[in-house]
Amino acid sequence: EAGVTQFPSHSVIEKGQTVTLRCDPISGHDNLYWYRRVMGKEIKFLLHFVKESKQDESGMPNNRFLAERTGGTYSTLKVQPAELEDSGVYFCASSQQDFGAYGYTFGSGTRLTVV
Amino acid sequence: AQTVTQSQPEMSVQEAETVTLSCTYDTSESDYYLFWYKQPPSRQMILVIRQEAYKQQNATENRFSVNFQKAAKSFSLKISDSQLGGAAMYFCAYRSGTSGTYKYIFGTGTRLKVLA
């Protein structure tokens, strides 16, 4: 079984540019989550999809962040325009119908550096 | 709002020895789930162990076990027979048991070093 795939693994962009992160969940997992870890701090929730619908987007920091999940398969997280404070590691995870009560499967993360 | 605190930014353990990582949390809920995740260098986080709050028995998984103290809101992880390949970041996480509230609350992590 393929795991959760994220790409790119690393991205370095200049302030003001746009970056799009992609996550491919495990096939059949309806639940997809985005989290972010800023250097040395806790991992923070961004949002949760159930299929193609946003179940909870309470963690999205501001309207520069746009997440989509077309057709309930892969998801993208776009940051436009990027700011320095957006730097960090962005994690994607997926789970089955239990909504994560039995744990998530995580991707390896995308390390975003805004310079 | 719930919070999770990992007070040990870094820990070291000798190979084959036992180490305990601490995690405390704050919540007013009675139904919830607690997790420990491990993230080896440059690799994805994997689930180590899971505890349901309504179960009094401490969860165990091979060399990993927890000491779940619900009244004290403590959820420590004990790793026995530490292995050289076991160096990783360990994250403690909380998930509400309330329907409709599915996000995880994570601690800041503990970096575990295993010494030869």
Image (cartoon, coloured by chain):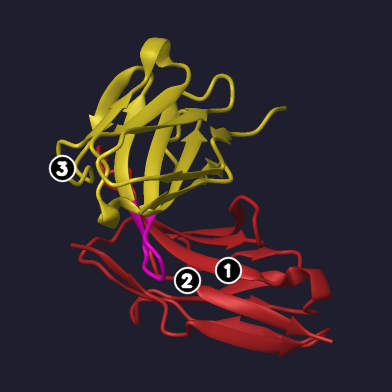
User: Quick one: label 1, few (<14), some, or many (20+) residues within 10 Å?
Assistant: many
Q: CA distance from mark 2 to mark 1?
A: 6 Å
Q: CA distance from mark 1 to mark 3?
A: 29 Å
> Which mark, by number, is residue B89?
1
Task: Residue type at mark 2: give it.
Answer: Gly
Was residue A65 drawn as part of the magenta stretch in this picture?
Answer: no
From the viewer's perspective, is the residue at label 1 or at label 3 nearer? 3
- In the image, the segment drawn in magenta is A37-44
The quadrant in which residue A34 appears is top left
Spot the yellow chain and give its letter.
Answer: A
> What chain does mark 2 sit on?
B
Q: Furthest-left residue in view?
A: A63
Judged by its main secondary structure, the magenta piece is loop
Marks 2 and 1 close (CB-CB < 8 Å): yes
Q: Residue at x 40, y 37 (%)?
A: A33
> Which mark, by number, is residue B109?
2
Do tags 2 and 3 sit on the same chain? no
Q: Position of residue A93 (x, y in %)?
A: 49, 39
Do tags 1 and 3 sit on the same chain? no
Quarter of the image for the N terminus of chain B: give it: bottom left
Residue tagged 3:
A62
Mark 2 lies on a secondary structure that is loop
> Which mark, by number, is residue A11?
none
Mark 3 lies on a secondary structure that is loop
Task: Residue type at mark 3: give it.
Answer: Asn
Q: Residue at x 23, y 46 (%)?
A: A59
Q: Position of residue B68 (x, y in %)?
A: 48, 74
Q: Is B82 located above or below residue B29 in the figure?
A: below
